[in-house]
Every structure is written in structure tokens, then in C-alpha cells.
Image (spheres, grey):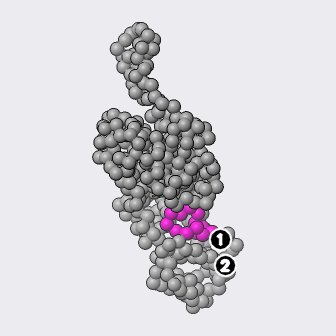
Amino acid sequence: MFTVRKFNQISDIIGKHLDQRHYEISEDAQSYEGILVRSADLLSAEFPPELVAIARAGAGYNNIPVDRCTEQGIAVFNTPGANANAVKELVLCGLLLAGRRIIDANRWLESLHEEHAEGIEKLVEKGKKQFVGPELMGKTLGVVGLGAIGVMVANAAVQGLGMKVLGYDPYLSVDAAWHLSSEVGRVKSLEEIYTSCDYITLHLPLNDQTRGMIGETAIQSMKPGTVLLNIARGGLVSEKALIAALESGQLRHYVTDFPDEGILGVKGVIATPHLGASTPESEENCAEMAARQLRAFIEDGNIVNSVNLPRCEMPRMGGYRISVINRNIKNMVGQITAALAESGCNIEHMVNSSRGEWAYTMLDLTTAPDQACIDRISAIDGVVRVRTLF
Ligand SMILES: NC(=O)c1ccc[n+]([C@@H]2O[C@H](COP(=O)([O-])OP(=O)(O)OC[C@H]3O[C@@H](n4cnc5c(N)ncnc54)[C@H](O)[C@@H]3O)[C@@H](O)[C@H]2O)c1
Ligand SMILES: O=C(O)CC[C@@H](O)C(=O)O
């Protein structure tokens, strides 16, 4: 029996993969092997020694202390693409809201309704000229980050809205490149996005490299009246520079899913309360993918879509499986296999993968290793976690 601690409301579909006979899903357990989380902040959380994996039901994982997890031998997973369509739709909505001044017009209508009991139709026709707003067709959209969401937004804007689209992503994956429409122009610098786009939308992770990337210099190099959309993470944009730019008209609108007390009420801000992934479809997709990955790792040691460990899968073909997380330094596999030989264990199957500074090995053994054998492997310099999976 395993315990999984849930840190947010997560779709009940997780029960399909983490069934009651083998898993207890708890909101307050103190000892647990797995975590399921959405946006809860775990950055300063203390983890129990039994914890082996955290699955983030979503794309961004800046709420998880990934480096600390790796040092403690905890695998971190996310669910790339599982909520991309929901976010794409919110971005398209943001483009339309900002382009056509729909929010201001709606507010005005509500005030008319409060002030006038009748004659609204005449007032509507007279007052509508204040809300003339440009069409999107023919305008240029810059997409920063061409991952699961960025590609969908870029394709929808170029193919469905008739916009010109420029995309920037220095780390574009082969998979994303395959899915990107050939009508989307790829640029090599952010400056090209800033200087040539009417609308700019951000779809990249928040990390030490990207925090505050949209600051005064970036905003000042944009076209006057640019609309900036940020459904990715609030920290990508410097609030001080943003507010000054909205006040001066350098930015016409800031469409964001990450409002706070600093920007709410500022003219030109169109905000939603972190609704990007809040559709039944994406909540289910994310929960299902997160639960499936958690189970594959807890029970079989298999790793798919981890953000800190290499992809590594080996089908179960019998035997006694152990898994090892270690630093990616020389002679680790040699030392692990030597420790097994010393304990009289025969290896039937083995797989080893590395990713940057870390490596992962799974070994299926003919006989169950005893505790002395596990201790011997754990004692190898660079090994941070050894698990028995039988
Ligand atoms: N508002 C929401 O509810 C919501 C929902 C999903 C995702 N998000 C946010 O959107 C982000 C993107 O999600 P995704 O599913 O497309 O992720 P993804 O991993 O598929 O794509 C991210 C892309 O950003 C690119 N990138 C990384 N650093 C970059 C840089 N410095 N400049 C340009 N591109 C860079 C990567 O190469 C990758 O292609 C997430 O990290 C998350 O923060 C928000
Ligand atoms: O869980 C959510 O509602 C938001 C998820 C979103 O921020 C993400 O990064 O995928």
C-alpha cells in the first residue's frame, strides 16, 4: 500500500490509476511516497524521507524545489501539453478582448443599465464610437516560447485569425518544430519580436533566466501601443516597468492570468484569476497524466516526462528490480554492478540513462538482494537513492 499526498483539488480521475486497493490518497498524511500537486507552493516544504516522486498536474513547476528534490533522490514530473488547448483558447480570448475593447464596452453598458431605466438602445448607438477597436487580421503576433502552448497559439493565430505570426524559441524541440505551421516565421532574437509585433504573448517557463525579462528596456523597444499577453507566469514581467508603460500608453493592454494588488485596477489591465488550465477537459488530462506517471515510477521505477531525471523505461520481465539515482560521474555503473556481484546477485536486465549532472539505473536481478547489498550500493559516493521495487 502506498500513500499519495494531494496538495490541491485534483480531478477524481486519479482514482482510475491510483486505485484504492494499492493507494491511499490523503490531504494530510505526514508520511507518503508520492505527491500530487497543482499550484500549491512547495518551495519551502519539508519532505518525508519516504517521498520518492512529485507529480505536478500542469506544465509549470516553479512551485517545486526541483534542485533540492534531485539532491534528495525525488523524481519530479509534470504533464506537458495536457492543458495546452485550454491555455490556447484563453490566449485567443485575450487577443479578442484586448483588440475590440470588449471589457470597457461591457463595463460602460453595465453603468448605463444602473443609471437609466429606459432609452438604452439610443444611448448604445450614440456611445459605441468610444469603443472602436482594431481587427486582428493582418496584425503581427509575436510568440515567445514555442512549446506545447506556443505552437498551438501560433498556429491558431496564423491559420484561424489571419495574423502574421513570428515565433522565438532558442531551444525549440524537434517535436514542436514538426507541429509548427510553416506560415509562422521564426526569429533569432527577442528584439525582432519586440520591434515588429502589435501583440506579444509569452509561453515560456519562469526560471532564473526568464524572471523579469520583460522590463523597461524590453518594453521601450516595443511598438507604441503594443498589447502584451502573459498567461505564463507573473514573474516574467517587471511590474514597475509594466505599470509605467500602461500609464504612458507604450503598452495598450496587459492581458494576464496572474493578477496581484499591484496591477489590479491599473488602466489597460485585463486579468483572469489563473484560469488557464481551468477547464474540465484539461483538469482531467493533467490529473490522469500525473497519476499515471506517479504510478509508473512508484511501482516500476519507469520515468516519463520528468523535469529532473532522464527518461528511462524498462518493461517488467520478471526478476527483482532495484533502481538507483546517482550523480552522473564516471564508473558509477561499474561500482553498482561490482556491489551486486559481491553480494552474489545476477543481473538479468539493466538500463541506464543520464541527464546533465544526474543519472538513473534500473536493474532486474535473478534473486532478491539483501539489505547488506542495498547498503553497499547506497554507500557508493554519488548515489543519492536506491529503491527495491519488488
Ligand atoms: N496560466 C496557466 O494556467 C498555465 C497553464 C499551463 C502553462 N502555463 C505556463 O506556460 C508555460 C509554458 O507551458 P507549455 O506547456 O507550453 O510548456 P513547454 O515546456 O511545452 O514550452 C515551453 C517552451 O519555452 C521555451 N523556452 C524556454 N526558455 C526560453 C527562453 N528563454 N526564451 C524563449 N523560449 C524559451 C522552451 O524551449 C519550450 O519550447 C509553463 O511553463 C507555465 O508556466 C500557465
Ligand atoms: O493547475 C492549474 O490550475 C494551473 C496550471 C498551470 O499554471 C500550469 O503551469 O500548468
Magenta extent: 301-314
Task: Look at the picture and state if 129 lies above or below 145.
Answer: above
Task: Out of 287 and 163, give the one closest to the viewer.
Answer: 163
The residue under the point 48% across, 74% down is 357
The residue under the point 66% across, 78% down is 349
Left or right: residue 267 versus residue 312 is: left
Quadrant of the snapshot with the C terminus: bottom right
Left or right: residue 303 versus residue 203 is: right
Count the labels in the image: 2
* Dot 2 amino acid type: His
The rendered magenta stretch, by its main secondary structure, is classed as loop
Task: Out of 295 and 357, give the one closest to the viewer.
Answer: 357
In the rendered image, residue 136, in percent from the top left (x then y), is placed at: 52, 35
Residue 26 shows up from this direction: no
- Residue designated by label 2: 349
| Residue 310, magenta (yes or no) | yes
